[in-house]
Image: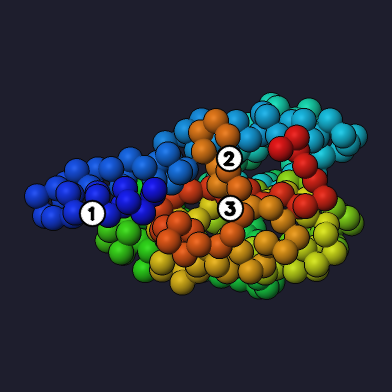
Amino acid sequence: MIQIFFKFYRKLFGNLFFLKINKLLFYSSIRGLGIFNYENMDVSGEKHFIKNFLKKDALRKDKYIVFDVGANVGDYSRLIAENIINAHIFSFEPHPKTFEILKINTKDLQNIYIFNCALSSKKGKLELYDYKSNDSSPHSSFNKDIFKSIHKAKDINTYKVDVCTIDNFCSENNIEIIDFLKIDVEGYELDVLKGAKMMLDNCKIRCIQFEFTQINVYTKVFFKDFWDILSEKYRIYRLIPKSMYEIKKYDPTLCEIFGFQNFVAIHKENSYGI
Protein backbone atom coordinates (compact mmCIF):
# COMPACT_ATOMS: atom_id res chain seq x y z
CA MET A 1 0.00 0.00 0.00
CA ILE A 2 2.77 2.41 0.92
CA GLN A 3 4.55 1.77 -2.38
CA ILE A 4 1.35 2.62 -4.25
CA PHE A 5 1.22 5.92 -2.37
CA PHE A 6 4.86 6.64 -3.24
CA LYS A 7 4.23 5.96 -6.94
CA PHE A 8 1.16 8.18 -6.91
CA TYR A 9 2.98 11.01 -5.12
CA ARG A 10 5.98 10.81 -7.41
CA LYS A 11 3.81 10.86 -10.53
CA LEU A 12 1.75 13.81 -9.29
CA PHE A 13 4.34 15.95 -7.46
CA GLY A 14 7.67 14.87 -8.95
CA ASN A 15 8.31 17.97 -11.04
CA LEU A 16 9.83 21.43 -10.59
CA PHE A 17 6.45 23.13 -10.23
CA PHE A 18 6.09 21.52 -6.77
CA LEU A 19 9.73 22.00 -5.72
CA LYS A 20 8.97 24.58 -3.00
CA ILE A 21 6.16 22.57 -1.45
CA ASN A 22 8.25 19.38 -1.53
CA LYS A 23 11.04 21.20 0.30
CA LEU A 24 8.55 22.60 2.80
CA LEU A 25 7.17 19.11 3.47
CA PHE A 26 10.69 17.70 3.84
CA TYR A 27 11.86 20.32 6.34
CA SER A 28 8.58 20.04 8.25
CA SER A 29 8.70 16.24 8.46
CA ILE A 30 12.28 16.04 9.72
CA ARG A 31 11.35 18.36 12.59
CA GLY A 32 8.72 15.80 13.51
CA LEU A 33 11.55 13.25 13.55
CA GLY A 34 13.59 15.34 16.01
CA ILE A 35 15.88 17.14 13.55
CA PHE A 36 16.52 20.93 13.62
CA ASN A 37 14.66 21.34 16.93
CA TYR A 38 17.42 23.52 18.37
CA GLU A 39 15.73 26.63 19.76
CA ASN A 40 15.70 25.50 23.40
CA MET A 41 15.76 22.39 25.58
CA ASP A 42 11.97 22.09 25.47
CA VAL A 43 11.73 21.65 21.71
CA SER A 44 14.93 19.57 21.56
CA GLY A 45 13.38 17.02 23.93
CA GLU A 46 16.24 17.32 26.44
CA LYS A 47 14.11 18.75 29.23
CA HIS A 48 11.47 16.05 28.79
CA PHE A 49 14.12 13.32 28.89
CA ILE A 50 15.68 14.66 32.08
CA LYS A 51 12.36 15.09 33.87
CA ASN A 52 10.70 11.87 32.73
CA PHE A 53 13.56 9.38 32.48
CA LEU A 54 16.75 10.50 34.24
CA LYS A 55 14.90 11.81 37.27
CA LYS A 56 13.21 8.43 37.77
CA ASP A 57 16.43 6.53 37.22
CA ALA A 58 18.25 8.68 39.78
CA LEU A 59 15.80 7.55 42.49
CA ARG A 60 17.46 4.13 42.37
CA LYS A 61 20.77 5.48 43.64
CA ASP A 62 22.13 7.50 46.56
CA LYS A 63 24.69 9.27 44.37
CA TYR A 64 24.06 9.93 40.67
CA ILE A 65 27.21 10.70 38.67
CA VAL A 66 26.74 13.07 35.71
CA PHE A 67 29.36 14.26 33.22
CA ASP A 68 28.46 17.45 31.32
CA VAL A 69 31.05 17.54 28.53
CA GLY A 70 30.93 20.86 26.72
CA ALA A 71 29.14 22.58 29.59
CA ASN A 72 29.32 26.06 28.01
CA VAL A 73 27.80 28.57 30.50
CA GLY A 74 26.11 25.88 32.62
CA ASP A 75 22.49 25.80 31.49
CA TYR A 76 22.44 22.02 31.13
CA SER A 77 24.27 21.44 34.42
CA ARG A 78 21.75 23.69 36.16
CA LEU A 79 18.82 21.80 34.63
CA ILE A 80 20.28 18.54 35.92
CA ALA A 81 20.88 20.00 39.39
CA GLU A 82 17.33 21.36 39.60
CA ASN A 83 15.75 18.01 38.69
CA ILE A 84 18.09 15.43 40.23
CA ILE A 85 18.81 16.31 43.85
CA ASN A 86 21.36 13.51 44.35
CA ALA A 87 23.33 14.41 41.21
CA HIS A 88 27.08 14.92 41.46
CA ILE A 89 27.89 16.88 38.31
CA PHE A 90 31.30 17.06 36.65
CA SER A 91 31.20 19.90 34.13
CA PHE A 92 33.92 20.36 31.51
CA GLU A 93 34.41 23.58 29.53
CA PRO A 94 37.71 24.32 27.72
CA HIS A 95 37.09 27.92 26.62
CA PRO A 96 38.81 30.16 29.23
CA LYS A 97 36.28 33.01 29.00
CA THR A 98 33.25 30.74 28.89
CA PHE A 99 34.65 28.86 31.88
CA GLU A 100 34.62 32.05 33.94
CA ILE A 101 30.93 32.52 33.11
CA LEU A 102 30.27 28.87 33.97
CA LYS A 103 31.95 29.41 37.32
CA ILE A 104 29.67 32.36 38.12
CA ASN A 105 26.50 30.67 36.87
CA THR A 106 27.01 27.52 38.95
CA LYS A 107 28.47 28.93 42.17
CA ASP A 108 25.15 28.47 44.01
CA LEU A 109 24.79 24.80 43.01
CA GLN A 110 25.73 21.97 45.35
CA ASN A 111 27.80 18.97 44.31
CA ILE A 112 29.04 20.46 41.05
CA TYR A 113 32.69 20.29 40.06
CA ILE A 114 33.89 22.36 37.11
CA PHE A 115 37.00 21.81 35.02
CA ASN A 116 38.61 24.14 32.51
CA CYS A 117 39.56 21.46 30.02
CA ALA A 118 38.23 19.52 27.05
CA LEU A 119 37.62 15.78 26.89
CA SER A 120 38.66 13.97 23.74
CA SER A 121 40.33 10.81 22.41
CA LYS A 122 43.74 11.46 23.93
CA LYS A 123 45.41 13.61 26.55
CA GLY A 124 47.36 16.72 25.52
CA LYS A 125 46.60 20.20 24.19
CA LEU A 126 44.49 21.45 21.27
CA GLU A 127 43.76 24.77 19.62
CA LEU A 128 40.24 26.04 20.23
CA TYR A 129 38.70 28.60 17.86
CA ASP A 130 36.01 31.20 18.48
CA TYR A 131 34.69 34.42 16.95
CA LYS A 132 36.78 37.49 17.68
CA SER A 133 33.60 39.60 17.61
CA ASN A 134 31.62 37.22 19.85
CA ASP A 135 34.17 35.48 22.02
CA SER A 136 32.95 32.80 24.48
CA SER A 137 30.24 31.77 22.01
CA PRO A 138 28.52 28.35 22.11
CA HIS A 139 30.06 27.65 18.68
CA SER A 140 33.71 27.42 19.82
CA SER A 141 35.34 24.49 18.06
CA PHE A 142 38.57 22.62 17.40
CA ASN A 143 37.92 22.94 13.66
CA LYS A 144 38.87 26.28 12.13
CA ASP A 145 37.10 25.51 8.84
CA ILE A 146 33.74 25.26 10.62
CA PHE A 147 33.87 28.98 11.41
CA LYS A 148 34.68 29.88 7.83
CA SER A 149 32.25 27.49 6.11
CA ILE A 150 29.24 27.30 8.43
CA HIS A 151 29.44 30.40 10.64
CA LYS A 152 30.96 32.70 7.98
CA ALA A 153 33.38 34.20 10.51
CA LYS A 154 36.12 36.50 9.24
CA ASP A 155 38.14 37.14 12.41
CA ILE A 156 38.90 34.27 14.78
CA ASN A 157 40.43 34.00 18.25
CA THR A 158 42.62 31.01 19.07
CA TYR A 159 43.24 29.41 22.47
CA LYS A 160 45.53 26.57 23.47
CA VAL A 161 43.50 24.39 25.85
CA ASP A 162 44.14 21.34 28.02
CA VAL A 163 42.65 18.03 26.90
CA CYS A 164 41.98 14.91 28.95
CA THR A 165 40.11 11.66 28.31
CA ILE A 166 37.20 10.18 30.23
CA ASP A 167 39.23 7.04 30.95
CA ASN A 168 42.14 9.04 32.38
CA PHE A 169 39.91 11.38 34.35
CA CYS A 170 37.91 8.54 35.91
CA SER A 171 41.07 6.62 36.78
CA GLU A 172 42.73 9.67 38.36
CA ASN A 173 39.60 10.65 40.33
CA ASN A 174 38.44 7.16 41.39
CA ILE A 175 35.17 7.38 39.45
CA GLU A 176 33.95 3.84 38.93
CA ILE A 177 30.75 4.52 37.02
CA ILE A 178 29.10 7.36 35.07
CA ASP A 179 25.32 7.27 35.30
CA PHE A 180 24.76 9.89 32.63
CA LEU A 181 27.21 11.29 30.10
CA LYS A 182 26.09 14.32 28.08
CA ILE A 183 28.31 15.37 25.16
CA ASP A 184 27.93 18.61 23.20
CA VAL A 185 31.30 19.46 21.65
CA GLU A 186 30.55 20.85 18.19
CA GLY A 187 31.16 17.79 16.04
CA TYR A 188 33.78 16.04 18.18
CA GLU A 189 31.40 13.85 20.19
CA LEU A 190 32.86 10.67 18.70
CA ASP A 191 36.35 11.62 19.94
CA VAL A 192 34.98 11.91 23.48
CA LEU A 193 33.60 8.36 23.23
CA LYS A 194 36.90 7.09 21.85
CA GLY A 195 38.54 8.48 24.97
CA ALA A 196 36.09 6.46 27.08
CA LYS A 197 36.94 3.07 25.55
CA MET A 198 37.75 1.34 28.85
CA MET A 199 34.64 2.70 30.57
CA LEU A 200 32.48 1.61 27.62
CA ASP A 201 34.09 -1.82 27.31
CA ASN A 202 33.55 -2.44 31.02
CA CYS A 203 29.91 -1.24 30.91
CA LYS A 204 30.66 1.65 33.27
CA ILE A 205 28.61 4.29 31.43
CA ARG A 206 24.90 3.72 31.84
CA CYS A 207 23.44 6.43 29.60
CA ILE A 208 24.85 8.78 26.96
CA GLN A 209 23.39 11.82 25.23
CA PHE A 210 25.20 13.14 22.17
CA GLU A 211 24.59 15.64 19.37
CA PHE A 212 24.76 14.93 15.64
CA THR A 213 24.64 18.00 13.39
CA GLN A 214 25.66 19.51 10.06
CA ILE A 215 29.06 20.13 11.63
CA ASN A 216 29.75 16.39 11.36
CA VAL A 217 30.20 16.90 7.61
CA TYR A 218 33.34 18.88 8.40
CA THR A 219 34.62 16.52 11.10
CA LYS A 220 33.88 13.61 8.73
CA VAL A 221 31.88 11.65 11.30
CA PHE A 222 28.80 9.65 10.32
CA PHE A 223 25.99 8.40 12.52
CA LYS A 224 27.22 4.95 11.46
CA ASP A 225 30.37 5.60 13.52
CA PHE A 226 28.26 6.04 16.67
CA TRP A 227 26.13 3.04 15.73
CA ASP A 228 29.21 0.81 15.40
CA ILE A 229 30.55 1.83 18.81
CA LEU A 230 27.29 1.79 20.77
CA SER A 231 24.58 -0.40 19.24
CA GLU A 232 25.87 -3.75 20.59
CA LYS A 233 25.44 -2.68 24.22
CA TYR A 234 23.07 0.29 24.00
CA ARG A 235 19.61 1.06 22.69
CA ILE A 236 19.81 4.29 20.70
CA TYR A 237 16.97 6.82 20.59
CA ARG A 238 16.47 10.15 18.86
CA LEU A 239 14.88 12.78 21.08
CA ILE A 240 11.69 14.54 20.00
CA PRO A 241 9.99 17.32 22.00
CA LYS A 242 7.84 15.18 24.30
CA SER A 243 9.32 11.74 23.87
CA MET A 244 11.96 9.76 21.98
CA TYR A 245 11.91 6.91 19.54
CA GLU A 246 14.27 4.01 19.11
CA ILE A 247 16.55 3.59 16.12
CA LYS A 248 16.13 -0.18 15.86
CA LYS A 249 18.28 -0.66 12.79
CA TYR A 250 20.77 1.42 10.89
CA ASP A 251 19.22 3.04 7.82
CA PRO A 252 21.48 5.50 5.94
CA THR A 253 18.51 7.38 4.49
CA LEU A 254 17.00 8.17 7.90
CA CYS A 255 20.16 8.18 10.02
CA GLU A 256 22.59 10.20 7.92
CA ILE A 257 20.68 13.48 7.96
CA PHE A 258 23.22 16.17 8.80
CA GLY A 259 21.07 18.52 10.86
CA PHE A 260 20.91 19.35 14.57
CA GLN A 261 19.57 16.42 16.60
CA ASN A 262 20.09 14.77 19.97
CA PHE A 263 20.47 11.04 20.49
CA VAL A 264 20.33 9.10 23.73
CA ALA A 265 22.05 5.73 24.12
CA ILE A 266 20.74 3.72 27.07
CA HIS A 267 22.62 0.63 28.18
CA LYS A 268 20.55 -2.50 27.56
CA GLU A 269 20.72 -3.41 31.24
CA ASN A 270 18.75 -0.23 32.03
CA SER A 271 15.11 0.36 31.15
CA TYR A 272 14.24 3.89 32.40
CA GLY A 273 10.62 2.78 32.29
CA ILE A 274 10.65 2.67 28.48
Locate residue 28 relative to residue 66 in the image: left or right.
left
Which residue was labeled with disc 3? 247
Q: Is residue 123 above or below residue 243?
A: below
Mark before the other along the chain sequence, 3 or 1: 1
Q: Position of residue 108 (x, y in %)?
A: 70, 28
Q: Gap between marks 3 and 1, in whole Å? A: 27 Å
Q: Of helix, strand and loop, which one carries label 1?
A: helix
Q: Position of residue 214 (x, y in %)?
A: 40, 58
Amino acid type at circle 3 is: Ile
Q: Are marks 3 and 2 in contact (CB under 8 Å)?
A: no
* Figure quadrant of the C terminus: top right
Whether residue 96 is visible, yes or no, is no
Observer-nearest of 3 and 225: 3
Observer-nearest of 167 and 109: 167
Q: Residues within 10 Å of mark 1 (few under 14, many from 20)?
A: few
Whether residue 206 is visible, yes or no, is yes
Observer-nearest of 51 and 17: 17
Q: Position of residue 80 (x, y in %)?
A: 68, 34
- Residue 10 numbered tag: 1
Residue shown at 72%/56% (left/top)? Answer: 234
Locate residue 136 relative to residue 83 in the image: left or right.
left
- Residue 244 numbered tag: 2
Q: Are marks 1 and 2 in contact (CB under 8 Å)?
A: no
Locate residue 213 relative to residue 98 in the image: left or right.
left
Residue shown at 63%/35% (left/top)? Answer: 49
Observer-nearest of 52 and 232: 232
Amino acid type at circle 1 is: Arg
Q: Gap between marks 1 and 2, in whole Å? A: 30 Å
Query: How many marks are shown on the rendered structure?
Result: 3
Q: Of helix, strand and loop, which one carries label 3?
A: loop
Splitting the image into 4 quarters, where does residue 106 fall? top right
